[in-house]
Amino acid sequence: MLILYPKLPNGNILWSCDNCDKTSEISFPNTSAVALFCSCDDTVHPQCNNDWYYKGLFWERIPMEKRKEYIKYIIQNV
């Protein structure tokens, strides 16, 4: 599962903790799948989004032949 958070009119992402409902505005233009550390239990929420990035699920969706091209695009546009 992957949780996509809504974009606000200013382009930021509105993240909310799935454990305590704290919210935060995130300014990262390339994704709506955000996972942040929350002080409610000192872990990352939501865990499924954390797994998306840190267990390789994000990269598995990109074909091997396209990964170098994708990395160059990200570096040039960040």
Image (cartoon, helix red, strand yellow):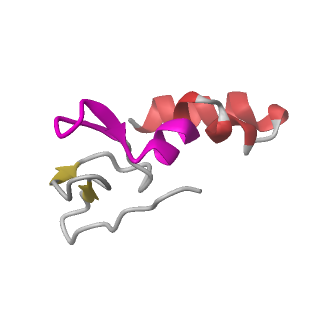
Tell me how many marks there are. Answer: 0
Q: Does residue 33 sit above or below 44 in this rendering? A: below
Residue at x-position 18% and y-position 53%: 25
Q: Is residue 1 left or right of residue 74?
A: right
Residue 16 horizontal/vertical position (percent): 25, 57
Q: Does residue 43 sit above or below 10 in this rendering? A: above
Residue at x-position 37% and y-position 42%: 35
Residue at x-position 30% and y-position 66%: 7
Quadrant (top left/top right/bottom left/bottom right) for the N terminus: bottom right
Residue 45 horizontal/vertical position (percent): 35, 44
Question: Is 46 covered by the magenta stretch?
Answer: yes
Q: Is residue 21 left or right of residue 50?
A: left
Q: Quadrant of residue 70?
A: top right
Q: Is residue 71 left or right of residue 65?
A: left
Of 73 and 13, which appears nearest the observer?
Answer: 13
Give, as a single range, the part of the protein colored magenta.
36-52
Give the residue furthest to the bottom. Answer: 9
Residue 76 horizontal/vertical position (percent): 47, 32
Residue 23 horizontal/vertical position (percent): 17, 56
Residue at x-position 37% and y-position 63%: 5
Question: Is 1 covered by the magenta stretch?
Answer: no
Q: Quadrant of residue 4?
A: bottom left
Quadrant (top left/top right/bottom left/bottom right) for the C terminus: top left
Of 57 and 40, which appears nearest the observer?
Answer: 40
Q: Does residue 72 sit above or below 25 in this rendering? A: above
